[in-house]
Amino acid sequence: MSQIKKYVITAMCITLCTVLPLVLHAVPGAGSTILPMHIPVLLCGLIAGPYFGLLAGLLGPLLSSFITGMPPMAYAPIMMTELAVYGAITGLLIRLVRTKNNYFNIYAALIPAMVVGRIITGIARALFFTPAAANETTLLAWWITSYFITSLPGIIIQLILLPIIIVALEKANLIRK
């Protein structure tokens, strides 16, 4: 895939990081439950590779924060950390894992990226940001609740939707396997 095509895909994914939250935030709590910025960043990593996935993960939340106020500027660095890790690791793993089963390759890139991204972001939050919920619960309980339980619907949506999108784009010859 050409560099220009990768830049165009990345720009589209960054734009989706602004548009999808606008659409889904009409539903109360949809941002932390459905995780609308995660899908375009993970998609960018899968299609364009680790550098472009990292770029989309950094710029998507930042641009959205400037344009829409979502995420709030105080929370944007946390989102940027999480999504940058997702985009980079997904892009790296999809290039490293090469089996004949395309769905396995996609899941082998998505699942570790989602776990590692949550771990790194949890560590970053513990070191650099004190969550308001930390006063009420232990930091570990808060991290598990916010990153795995509350976001479970979004995780499931990502695991179902992203392989379907990738395979559809491949069948339409818009991207290569």
Image (cartoon, helix red, strand yellow):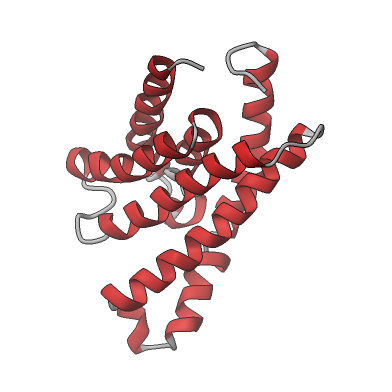
Instruction: Please give the name of the residue rendered at 27% of the width and 73% of the height, measured from the top-left corner.
Output: 128
Percent coordinates x, y for residue 115 in the rendering: 57, 61
Residue at the right extreme, as displayed: 100
- Residue 25 seen: yes
User: Which residue is more in the foreground, 149 or 124?
Assistant: 124
Instruction: Please give the name of the residue rendered at 61% of the width and 55% of the height, measured from the top-left corner.
Output: 112
Which image quarter: residue 74? bottom left
On screen, 34 above or below 40? below
- Residue 28 seen: no
User: Which residue is more in the foreground, 95 or 17?
Assistant: 95
On screen, 154 above or below 54? below
Percent coordinates x, y for residue 38 in the rendering: 47, 45
On screen, 119 above or below 138? above
Q: Is residue 27 left or right of residue 61?
A: right
Instruction: Please give the name of the residue rendered at 19% of the width and 38% of the height, measured from the top-left corner.
Output: 67
User: Which residue is more in the foreground, 143 or 32?
Assistant: 143
Percent coordinates x, y for residue 87 in the rendering: 46, 44
Instruction: Please give the name of the residue rendered at 43% of the width and 16% of the height, measured from the top-left corner.
Output: 5
Percent coordinates x, y for residue 45 in the rendering: 50, 37
Q: Quadrant of the C terminus?
A: top right
Which image quarter: residue 25? top left
